[in-house]
Image (cartoon, grey):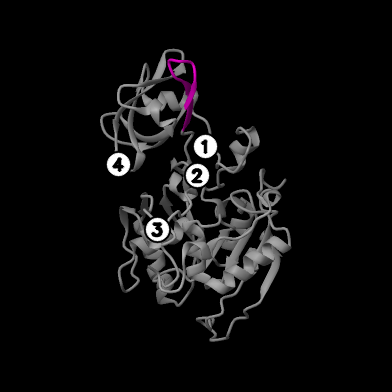
Amino acid sequence: MAADFRTADFDYHLPPELIAQEPVAERGASRMMVVRRTDGLTDRRTGAVLSTDIEDRTFAELPELIPPGDLLVLNDTRVRHARLLGMRPSGAPAEVLLLHPATDGDWVAIGKPGSALRPGKRITLGDGVEIETVEVLAEGYRRVRAIGADMEEAIRRFGRLPLPPYIHHDPTDLDEARYQTVYAREEGSVAAPTAGLHFTPAILSELEARGVELARVTLEVGPGTFKPVEDDDYTRHPMHPESYVVPEQAANQIAAARVRRARIWAVGTTVVRALESAADSSGVVHPGRAETRLMIAPGYRFKVVDALLTNFHLPRSTLLLLVAAFAGYDRIRAAYAHAVEQRYRFYSYGDAMVIL
């Protein structure tokens, strides 16, 4: 058990109307809170002590905060149309959420109700296409296969964008455009890396024009990102596995940034988990593909990431534990109280926070 905190310490009151149901009218127009850490953080190049004030700014001002030469790391994953809605033989509804390919054309999935995903049972999608459960795996996962089409065709014909459970509408054309980052390339996630949703091509171009370097990694965001920590001892929480890839180019860019004493900026908690998982004890990030179950909570010593761009996260979530570890528990409590008071928008379609 962590010495100083319990899971209940990461709860907070959030008025439901602050949970953003749609993105702001224009991408890049969100508000942005700037939180400066209280641990004596100094600028690596000048040695100047940075302020610890909370500032209310806009996302369009982000380029002003990142000095030339710093490295901004993006997660280029793309959200797969992984949600399949169908009918049981009784006519009752059922759904399957595809997570990733397994072997021999099968996929690993979750779904509901669980009784509809027992081995041998089928869910009809339409036009002779069905999803059959082959095997029940650990942690509630299922191995499933498509009948009447291969799974890629089933996704193309019947797949829906898997919006988060706190967004209470069916996917629209707006969601199709805005629940993907403008730099998404590698399809495989069931949720968006939401800190990246704020970026526009113009903002990315402005950053590069100012001398900020961009790097790309891929982490496939899984459904566990929305799962609350239920045990009051959060160290017993079973972390969801997520696959990630750190290309050799990104690893080299990080190493070069360290040599020139530049800061590494992570765009989102997914980038933090990928980089910290790929780093050895000395902070060297190694390229390659792997799976991580890394939980980052207060007391964790960060080896790679110096600054974090993120959104506002769910109570009792592993993501909130991560940002509290990065910024400091008291500072995050104050920042979230400020966000509620100032009516910031929360969660996937919500506003941004920068932690320096």
Q: Secondary structure at mark 4?
A: helix
Is 11 on the left-hand or right-hand side of 156? Answer: right
Q: Are marks 4 and 2 in contact (CB under 8 Å)?
A: no
Query: Would you say residue 86 sits in the magenta stretch?
Result: yes
Splitting the image into 4 quarters, where does residue 188 fall? top left
Do callouts 2 and 1 mark residues in contact (Cβ within 8 Å)?
yes
- Disc on the earlier residue, 3 or 2: 2
Q: Which residue is mark 4?
A: 138
CB-based contact (under 8 Å), mark 3 and mark 2: no
Between marks 4 and 3 in the image, the one whose residue lies nearer the viewer: 4
Residue 28 vertical placement versus 93 (above, below): below
- The range drawn in magenta is 83-94
Q: Quadrant of the C terminus?
A: bottom right
For badge 2, the amino acid type reads Ala
The one nearer the camera, 2 or 77, is: 2
Residue labelled with disc 2 = 191
Residue located beneath label 3 in the image? 274
Is residue 72 something that shows in the picture?
no
